């Protein structure tokens, strides 16, 4: 796609649009240029490298889509790489945003994310007094924008898990539901691997003395770090919820199996009474006692009914039936 937006800002106000071929670090004290690119070509990155003195390794990292969040310092410039995340079905899809920061320029390179910065740029332009702080404030706004995008991902997965937890209390979890829980758990674990480096990245922006970052900007990055910690806490809690759903489902299944086992045992004991008596009188011996008793048949049936009834009442009292 290439260049999405390229503007020169003067005293916090958008001054003019700049073509990529004409882009260069502005000379004015209160001026900076903000260039936004989405899936740029190698030639476009080479042009920016030559015009803004970007480090070769940073450019390579910006074109590589399998990097982890990090902060690198190249002379008087700062290179920041952050991970974006969005939910597609039950899968968390990741993208990358590389940010080149200098005193008079900030260049963003997005890969794999459809959540552009146009809305963010418009919000910042509505507050020119904040844009006058320079590129470090824009860097904070971009990272904060990306971290805020993590919250809907976590909340949506949390809603899915809580929905399955509610259904689990009413009936057994079917195999597709159990498989889905495992998939969500895997996504949460992979997300934690992204949040760890993101937390370290924000910590460096807060605590280290880095080029292009004024001391007055530290509180803004500290706020972003708090947001990352909040997401980390939510993800850790979500992982615990998924684990508890598995455990609770297993316990409920064992309990239900125990109830069924007791019911089967109780009915088997009741049915054993007529079976045993019938088995005894079913033996083909000639000289069995009471064979000639006039009311023996009814007496035996009565004994069977009394014994079975007594067992039924007893099992009912112990809640086996």
Image: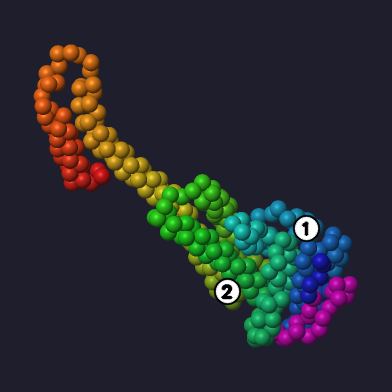
Residue 165, picture quadrant? bottom left
From this view, report whether residue 237 is shown above or below residue 52: above
Question: The N terminus lies in which quarter of the figure?
Answer: bottom right
For residue 54, side relative to residue 179 (left or right): right
Q: Residue at x 56, y 67 (%)?
A: 152
Residue 36 in picture, x, y percent from top left? 76, 71
Does label 2 or label 1 sit earlier along the sequence?
1
For residue 210, side relative to residue 176 (left or right): right
Which residue does the numbered mark 1 point to in the structure image? 63
For residue 9, side relative to residue 150 (left or right): right
From this view, report whether residue 33 is shown above or below residue 147: below
Q: Residue at x 71, y 76 (%)?
A: 118
Q: Secondary structure at mark 1?
A: helix
From this view, report whether residue 268 is shown above or below residue 226: above
Q: Secondary structure at mark 2?
A: helix
For residue 252, side relative to residue 310 (left or right): right
Q: Residue at x 67, y 76 (%)?
A: 120
Seen from the viewer's position, the closer of residues 74 and 294 is 294
Residue 254 in picture, x, y percent from top left? 36, 43
Q: Which mark is residue 120?
A: none
The span shown in magenta is 6-23
Seen from the viewer's position, the closer of residues 124 and 151 is 151
Which residue does the numbered mark 2 point to in the structure image? 220
From this view, report whether residue 300 is shown above or below residue 243: above
Residue 198 in picture, x, y percent from top left? 59, 60
Residue 318, picture quadrant? top left
Q: Residue at x 52, y 65 (%)?
A: 155
């Amino acid at each position: 796609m290439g260049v999405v937006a390229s503007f020169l800002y003067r005293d916090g106000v958008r001054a003019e649009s700049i073509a990529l071929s004409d882009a260069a670090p502005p000379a004015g004290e209160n001026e900076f240029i903000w260039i936004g690119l989405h899936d740029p070509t190698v030639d476009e990155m080479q042009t920016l490298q030559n015009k803004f003195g970007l480090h070769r390794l940073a450019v390579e990292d910006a074109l590589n889509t399998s990097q982890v969040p990090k902060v690198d310092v190249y002379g008087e410039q700062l290179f920041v790489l952050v991970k974006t995340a969005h939910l597609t079905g039950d899968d968390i899809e990741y993208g990358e945003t590389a940010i080149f920061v200098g005193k008079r320029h900030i260049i963003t390179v997005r890969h794999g994310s459809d959540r552009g910065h146009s809305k963010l740029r418009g919000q910042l332009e509505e507050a020119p007094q904040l844009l006058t702080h320079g590129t470090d404030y824009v860097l904070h706004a971009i990272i904060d924008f990306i971290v805020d995008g993590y919250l809907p991902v976590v909340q949506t997965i949390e809603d899915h898990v809580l929905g399955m937890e509610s259904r689990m209390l009413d009936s057994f979890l079917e195999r597709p539901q159990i498989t889905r829980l495992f998939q969500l758990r895997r996504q949460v674990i992979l997300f934690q691997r992204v949040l760890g480096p993101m937390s370290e990245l924000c910590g460096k922006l807060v605590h280290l003395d880095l080029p292009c970052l004024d001391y007055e900007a530290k509180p803004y990055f500290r706020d972003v770090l708090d947001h990352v910690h909040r997401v980390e806490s939510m993800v850790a809690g979500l992982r615990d919820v998924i684990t508890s759903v598995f455990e609770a489902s297993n316990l409920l299944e064992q309990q239900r199996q125990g109830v069924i086992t007791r019911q089967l045992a109780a009915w088997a004991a009741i049915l054993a009474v007529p079976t045993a008596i019938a088995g005894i009188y079913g033996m083909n011996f000639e000289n069995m006692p009471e064979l000639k008793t006039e009311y023996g048949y009814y007496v035996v049936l009565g004994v069977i009914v009394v014994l079975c009834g007594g067992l039924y009442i007893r099992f009912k009292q112990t809640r086996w039936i």
